Amino acid sequence: MTQPGKAGPLLRIRDATMEFGGGFLSSHPPLVALDSFSLDLHESPAQITTIAGESGSGKTTLANLVLGFISPTQGQILYKGVDLSQLDRKQRLTYRQEVQAIFQDPYDVFNPFFRIQHTFNLVMRHFALAQDKLERRELIEDALNVVGLRGDEILEKYPHQLSGGQRQRVMVARAYLLRPRLIVADEPVSAVDASLRAMILDIMLRLRDEHGISFLYITHDLSTAYQIGDNMIVLFQGITAETGDTGQIIENPQHPYVQELINSIPVPDPKIKWDTDIRLPAEETMRSQNAEGAPRGCRFYQRCPHRMDICLENQPPLIPVEGQHAVACYLYES
Amino acid sequence: MAVGQRTSDDASAPAQGWGLNTWDSPWLNFKFLLGAGIVLLILLFGLVGPLFWDTDLAYTGAGPLNKPPVWDEGGLPEHPLGTESNGRDMLAQLILATPSSLKVGFLAAIIGMGIGMALGSVAGYVGGWWDHVIRTLSDSAVTIPALVVLVVIASYVQMTDTTAMALILALFAWPGPTRLVRSQVLTLRERSYVRMAHLSGASALEIMFVEMLPNMLPWLAASLTGGISAAILGATGLEVLGLGPTRVPSLGLIINQATTNAALVRGLVWWWLPPIIILMVIFVGFFLMTIGLDEIANPRIRQFSSTRRERTAAGELPPVEPIEDGTAGEEEAALEVDDLHVHYFTPRGEVIAANGVNFSVRKGEILGLVGESGCGKTTVAMAILQVVQPPGRIVQGAVRIEDRDLVSLSGRDLRQVRWRDLALVPQGAMNSLNPVTPIREQMADAILAHENIGRAELEQRILNLLNDVGLPERVIDMFPHELSGGMKQRVCIAMSIALNPQVIIADEPTSALDVVVQRVVAQTLLEVKERLGVSMVMIGHDMGLQAQLVDRIAVMYAGNLVEVAPVESAFAEPLHPYTQLLIESIPSIRERKPLNVTEGLTHDLRDPPPGCIFQFRCKHVERICRERRPELVERDDDHLVACWLYEPERHSLIESEEA
Amino acid sequence: MRGLTKEYVLQRFLMYLLTIWLGSTLIFVIPRLAPGDPVSEMVGRLSLDSGYIENADKLIASWKARFGLDAPIHVQYFRYWGNVFRLNFGYSLSHFPTEAWSMVSRALPWSLGLLTVATVLSFSIGVTVGSLMGWRRTPRWLQMILPSSLAFTAIPYFMFGIMLIYLVAFELDWLPATGAYSRRVDPGWNLPFIKNMLSHAILPVVSIVLTSMGGWALGMRGLMISVNNEDYFLLAQVKGLSPARIFFRYGVRNAILPALTALALGLGGLISGSILVEFIFAYPGTGYSLYQAIISQDYTVTQAIANLIILVTATSVFLLDLLYPFIDPRITYKRTMR
């Protein structure tokens, strides 16, 4: 499927909305997990795009949408110009091969019943990657070498016999084996020890630079995103709050929520203590309002130090501030 | 409970795979194997019996009437188990009846299991309306009293053979497996490995049978053995009532004939007792299999029984010898941990989770205890609180508050010290509050266990405490599930200060919370500490948070304390190579810096190397590091480190030893 | 929101109706699916017993007409449902002018009494034993003794009943073997009758309790072990609470919730088992009456009893369901925070 939209983006998400619940027999309105989300990911240059957000922001929903586990209630997700729901058999196989994932829990991704080998055999078989046993073995060995592992060390072992760092690297190797164009990395380092985190992040950088693989890096941790990310989208309760270059957002956040978020990250320097004067809202008001039905106005209204009357009227649109940098906040409306 | 149990910070035993190839495979469960053996024996009796005994004797008039077994007076050797009132030979009847009873059970249960697997996986995997319909049907079918319906059916439908009987019994054998498979599929489909298989291009059927099925095996097997005995029970019930097939001998039919012929009153014990004994043995066999399989499926139950057994085998544990105040004994110490050793006694060897840990917490300070997963920091916290879970145990050391050694206290004495002097803010408040009682009761519990105060005063006190941590008053009557994570954690903080304790252990108090909420909770902790002047041990892995919160920091690696220092000097000038690594690997939000990649090779905690425990990962490793373990020594002002690098005499030390 | 919500009650009530419908329909449908029809079957069986029946065809036709079996199946089904709904099943065949329903209502109190006592005893003893077995702080000597109470767990009630009759009633002659009371006492509220009635009830109750309590105990043990590992259980210890308080308020209070669900699900099995116990002990409850009705080919009474037992079981499950939200505050709380 090279013909349609070769010039177009690799992945295009257009106004994707995802609602859960509601329906017959339920007295609750549906929960809007993701609201009119749009995103274009280009094939080259390969980039790491961070989707940042806290629990309930909709970032995991987005990952599930891109991976095709769920379909959006409204809107479209196009891979190489074709809607995911309209892929034919061959296109679907290509999409499956080219869009891969790394998940958070490096233990849970392995079926405890099988040896590590099984993980590789599964992809080898379904995507017919190798002609014979020898080639198969070579491909696996090659993929493992990319992440700094050796086949004879791990393939015959059971998942519980590997360390957390090893398991996560095997998962990266598995994804790499398929030569994907895009890897959805859903919190890949949040269950890995700090001293091993760098290794995984470094592998991601190398896959981007040396193999041209793009990443959708889904995380709650802005600091690691700052270290490796190219672009960033910050989600708040299903809404895109701020989008732009990673450096722009982290160094110069515009949305009051993003400012609050960045201010709350503990500084790893005992000499720079938290500014205790900052007034934080009581948590009751932090509870997701859209649990009670989608509000019309800005979802950050209750907590916002700069709230205005207009914020109650409508959800603010994305307003460009500088270059790519855009903010969903009426403060920046000229 | 799903297969994946929570892997705790200091996992004592590695989670096991389901592999069938090893000798410590969970399938080698004594009860399961014993039960299977019993069932096999009975089966063998029925299958091999006809080769050795003439089964034609099982029919009317084959022998004399009412003869007792051969060992009784009047017994005949040609009828070793005696005969009944129609002259049928008991042994021959039993040989014929046993396999047919088993066959009905197996057939009905397997049909039920097949239907259950089909319906359950459709409900769990496809979901939606299918799930709605199947779940509702199986939920209500499971409560119908099966035998009543069976009896009515059997009274109309003449059952000619065991197969017809099995088919009718299968009507009631599917709801159980359906419910089981549905709930298993629902749990498993959320597992990452199932989603991974999906991404690997596996079809729904392949996911069901290759990825999910093996992980349900112990549950399915338990359900199958349970189902078989239920079906045998149902079949036997009908036969005993005389509603089963009457032309084929069956154990229930023998009992029916015995009771209708008043065998009990007439004292013909050999008529009614043998079939009952065989049935009981069958039921005991399946029962053992079922509970064995339950243990296989539930590692916690397995672990509970094995630790108990190990403890019983070891006899009374030797008490921990109290240590006389050995350290320099800091003047202002609120809490002293002295040479603490905690071991986990696993079937695969002794895991040393804390190895001679020494530190003290000064009055009014926050001491940070940091390290990565498995380093033993949580074990130390649990040891301070005297709640090390089996198979773990404090084998040596002392934990002192105001010169009282908590390790040597027990029973009422220990209970009095708890919470009054030493409180806990637990890890991840998600699960630390009792889900079924309101906050009021849980807070009152802590206060009333130590003080005798009236209702009004108690209520006022709880309200004040909630107020102290910034929670509204209505929280008092709420249940844990009605609170957000941060609110729950603040309830825990309020609870911890209820009795104004000397020391609070805060075990990763903010680890499961969002960044903003984490900050709110951390600031609440700081405020509380400032106001009450309480001392705290703050356990954590987030170095950024530690920098913000603690006064001194203690770094643990593989069960050993490697560095203890004031937080400023620890961050400005970390001495131990491991501390340096930890600090360098903090991702910064202030500057972009190249990633500092290190190998994560560690040793097996069951078999620590001689010499320094960090030697395999250390860049500066020397010969002495491999041979002798460095002591925790003060190298700078209040800055302690366990590393040979800072020992000027290290070369001569090892040479003098050789000389 | 706590306690009962409209949604929950409605949902449970629908389940209740569905259960009754399912059970009654099974009784109605299966005999008709089988080759032949119930009346011919019955007559056929009669002829087996007594050799030959004159004018069998006529007899079958007249019986069919009497039971409305000559009507089309859907008409029969609606009529049947009307009967179930009004608890009206017509006259007993074997005791003619007596109504089927009145025969059933005479048997019902005996069954309800026997079953309630046996269920309450076995559940409460089982839960207590299981909780103690699954608790780390239970004294060692108790831990050694408790498993012995599981000795009879695997044995079906009625087999245990037969052995009890043989040992206790015939060999030792301590207690009466069968029936609910002796003919020599006058039924009524007088001491000799009550004593006599109780002495008849002991063996059936004991045979149910001893064989079923082990199942509850084992289940409860597993649940208690899980609770032992919960964070709140640990926190309760650290709070310095007394062992008894931890055991009851934090341990049993949580572990018993799934056990109650299991009780609701297991009631059907319990009632099934008791039919056989009543048969063995000739205890004049619904189970024994069901047996007698079947033996005497009493079509109407059979249906009445079977439907009644289904109704009673479903009602007990429904009541337990309604009780549950008061014990577990989480059950009606649908939407979790995200």
Image: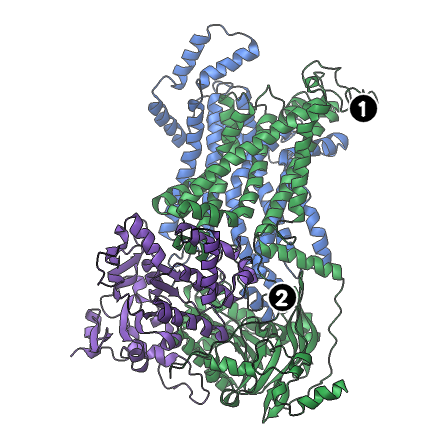
Chain colours: A purple, B green, C blue
Query: Mark 1 — on which chain does it sit?
Result: B
Q: Is residue C11 above or below residue C77?
A: below
Q: Decide if residue C288 is on the left or right side of residue B34.
A: left
Coordinates of residue B651 in the picture (x, y in percent): 68, 89
Q: Which residue is mark 2?
A: B389
- Residue drawn at x 51%, y 23% is B155
- Ranked by sequence position, the earlier of labels 1 and 2 is 1
Mark 2: which amino acid? Gln
Report the amino acid beneath label 1.
Answer: Val
- Residue B370, image x and y in percent? 54, 78
Neighbour class for label 2 at 10 Å: few (<14), some, many (≥20)? some
Specify whether residue C249 is in view.
no
Q: Front-most of C104 and A320?
A: A320
Front-most of residues B401 and B506: B506
Q: Secondary structure at mark 1?
A: loop
| Residue pictured at 54% horizontal, 19% vertical | C296
Read off the chain for label 2.
B
**Which element is circle 2 on?**
loop
Answer above or below: position of B232 versus C72.
Answer: below
